[in-house]
Amino acid sequence: MIIAAACDNNQISGHFGHCESFKLFYAENGKITSQSNLPNPGHRPGFLPNYLADQGVNVIISGGMGGGAIEIFNERKIEVITGATGDAKDVVEAYLRGELKSSGSICHEHIHADECGRHHDSGNS
């Protein structure tokens, strides 16, 4: 099983498409066996879900994600977990223990992508 975590440094990113990289965790029998780092090749509508599916990803974990990306992941039979926060490895281990559930967090407006996840005030209204 390959679990991808959308990350900024080693922390789960608040927005899937704008993360710095994807940490790929390879797991067998409920344990992480290895991991690698996959730099984000760039955010384009519909691209990243198919790119990760082509890497063999079975699960994607992120803070927030647009509805279009979620639909593509669902079509590709990839489990989507949103609403996650914290250290990527800790979050993936919680998923493997069955302790991580998706909040269903969907980012509706990509023009305000900087507000996804953390919802900090950018001063724009």
Image (spheres, rainbow, N blue to C red):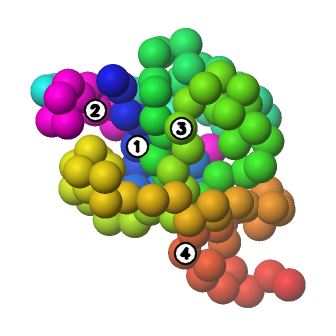
- The kind of residue tagged 2 is Phe
Q: Disc 2 to disc 4, how far (Cα)?
A: 24 Å
The secondary structure that most of the magenta stretch takes on is: strand
**Left or right: where 37 falls relative to 54:** left
Marked residue nearer the N-terminal end (2 or 3): 2
Circle 2/circle 1 CB separation < 8 Å? yes
Task: Specify the segment rendered in magenta.
Answer: 17-31
Q: Distance between the residues labelled 4 and 3?
A: 23 Å
Crowding near the residue tagged with mark 3, few <14, some 14–19, many ≥20 C-alpha atoms within 10 Å: some
Look at discs 2 and 4 and give the one toward the viewer: 2
Amino acid type, callout 3: Glu
**Where is residue 71, by image quadrant?**
top right
Q: Where is residue 47 in the image (x, y as percent from the top left)?
A: 70, 26
Residue at 56%, 30% in the rendered image: 78
Which numbered circle lies on residue 5? 1
- Is 18 part of what is drawn in magenta? yes
Q: Position of residue 46 (x, y in %)?
A: 76, 30
Q: What residue type is labelled 4?
A: Arg
How packed mark 2 is, by other alpha carbons closer than 10 Å (few <14, some 14-19, many 20 or more), is many
Tell me the element at label 1.
strand
Residue bearing mark 3: 79
| Residue hosting label 2 | 25
Real-space CA distance between mark 2 and mark 1, rounded to the nearest whole angstrom: 8 Å
Could you give the CA–CA distance between mark 2 and mark 3, rounded to whole angstroms? 14 Å
